Amino acid sequence: MGGESGPERGRGVRLKDVRTAAGLTQLELAQRVGVSRKTINTVENGVFIPSTLLALKLAEALNVKVEELFFLS
Amino acid sequence: MTLQAQPRDPGERRRRVITAAAIMLMLMAGAAVTAASTHSGPPRPVDLVRDSGLLLLALVIALRATTSFTLLKRNAELDDELSRATRAGAARAGYWALLIAIMAAFVASLFIELPLPQIAPLLLAVGAAGAGLRFAVLESRGG
């Protein structure tokens, strides 16, 4: 249990795959969740880690569970 | 003849403006240091104008790069989560730049005479322009 959350675990982002599968552009997704296109781009590229609130908004906008967008690898 | 297209992304426009302002601030600080080292006596009107401009520009850069303060209508796109994280990073960079500059000035003052009117514009420029340039670098992430 506790060993699963060790610092050696990386994070994964599947936002781009899910977004493109939904047929949305970065700008369209950004408008749905109320952020800039640049924010979506940096989240997709792993440059910026979104807050829990934004992660939930992204999942809701894409109609998926948040675990399908962000996960520990 | 065609006019050059303006950047449509307001974040890109903000980044360019802050970069230009930070460079201008450093040039103004250089002029202020030069003037302070070559002119002694009571301040002349030209000194007051230059130093007022320096203070105002430093204040504007610091506010724009590290806070969401604006006198105009707030643009939600320019105040999203990424912008807030960028501002926090810029504030950290400005703080450390200023702290290191003050330490360097303190050490230098042990060996050479450093009057406040001569060193203050430099410290101001390092702190404010450091935050502004860091903001511009962080803001350039994500294209």
Image (cartoon, coloured by chain):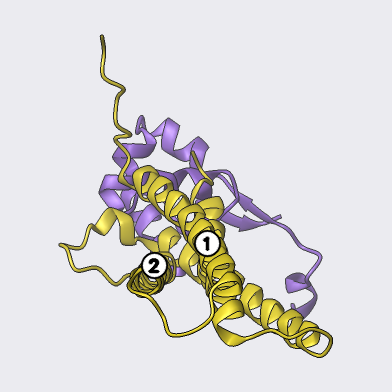
Chain colours: A purple, B yellow
Q: Residues within 10 Å of mark 2 (few under 14, many from 20)?
A: some
Q: Is residue B64 left or right of residue A50?
A: left
Q: Are marks 1 and 2 in contact (CB under 8 Å)?
A: yes
Give the side of residue B66 with respect to residue B69, left or right.
right
- Is residue B19 placed above or below B84 in the rendered structure? above
B84 shown above or below B142: below
Image coordinates of residue A6 in percent, x first then y, are: 78, 72
Please tell me which residue lies in front, B118 or B121.
B118
Disc 1 target residue: B31
Image point (37%, 71%), residue name: B63
Q: Residue at x 48, y 61 (%)?
A: B28
Q: Amino acid at mark 2?
A: Arg
Q: Give the x, y percent position of residue B74.
A: 20, 63
The residue under the point 63% across, 86% down is: B115
Residue B67, visible in the rendered structure? yes
Camera-nearest residue between A16 and B102: B102
Instruction: Give B9 or B119, whichever is nearer the viewer.
Output: B119
Q: Observer-nearest residue: A64 or B91?
A: B91
As drawn, is A9 to the left or to the right of A23?
Answer: right
Of all chains, the one bearing label 2 is B
Residue B97 lies, in percent from the top left, at 64, 72
Image-quadrant location for residue B112: bottom right
Residue type highlighted by circle 1: Ala
Secondary element type, mark 2: helix
Mark 2 — residue? B50
Does dot 1 land on a helix, a strand or a loop?
Answer: helix
Q: CA distance from mark 1 to mark 2?
A: 9 Å
Can residue A49 be seen at all in this image of the molecule?
Answer: no
